Amino acid sequence: MALAVLPQTLSLMTASTRRTVLSLYMRVFRIARTWQAQSGVINDTEAERKYIVQEARSLFRQNQQMADQESIKRSIEECEARIEIGLHYRNPYPRATYLPPMGLATQKGRKLRAQQRLRKQAKPIYLQSHDET
């Protein structure tokens, strides 16, 4: 169903990039089909499977208009990182972001800009698609 949207925008990509994106997309859905919650509770498993599918669809749709090869590469790296982290920790949800020292400095002038720069630098690759909260 969601694949019908992808091919029209993937025409901007090279053939190898297109193949990589589609294989990642299908890999995420295969993982969701076989996902088992760490708790072993059926309701948890279903909720996590639903989360994986919804997250994949929303992020792939959000990034489908990308034309810059560098941003596409970063998104592919993010997807691969999230898959590996999720499989390793058996947790589909993004891991917490830790602020660097002085990440909560007084919000005035230069200190605010420095604080924003520190937060941006501390943001891990697997959370690049998520907005600041």
Image: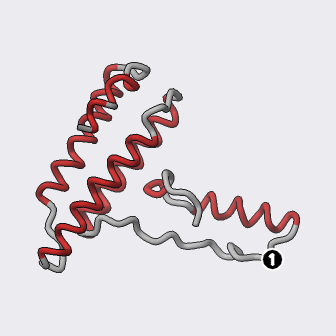
Please identify the residue farthest to the front as the structure is shown. 1
Please identify the residue farthest to the right as the structure is shown. 109
How many marks the image carries: the answer is 1
Where residue 86 appears, as percent x and y from the top left, is 29, 62
* Front in this rendered view, residue 121 or 19: 19
x 17%, y 80%: residue = 39
Amino acid type, residue under disc 1 in the picture: Thr
Quarter of the picture containing the C terminus is bottom right
Where residue 44 appears, as percent x and y from the top left, is 20, 74
Assess disc 1: are there few (<14), some (14-19) or many (≥20) residues with their C-alpha within 10 Å of its C-alpha. few
Is 33 on the left-hand or right-hand side of 22? left
* Front in this rendered view, residue 102 or 106: 106
Quarter of the picture containing the N terminus is top left
Note whether 75 is above or below 101 in the view shown. Answer: above
Location of residue 75 by image quarter = top left
Residue corresponding to mark 1: 106
Where residue 8 appears, as percent x and y from the top left, is 36, 22
* Front in this rendered view, residue 22 or 126: 22
Location of residue 103 by image quarter = bottom right
x 33%, y 49%: residue = 56
x 23%, y 62%: residue = 87
For numbered disc 1, what is the local secondary structure?
loop
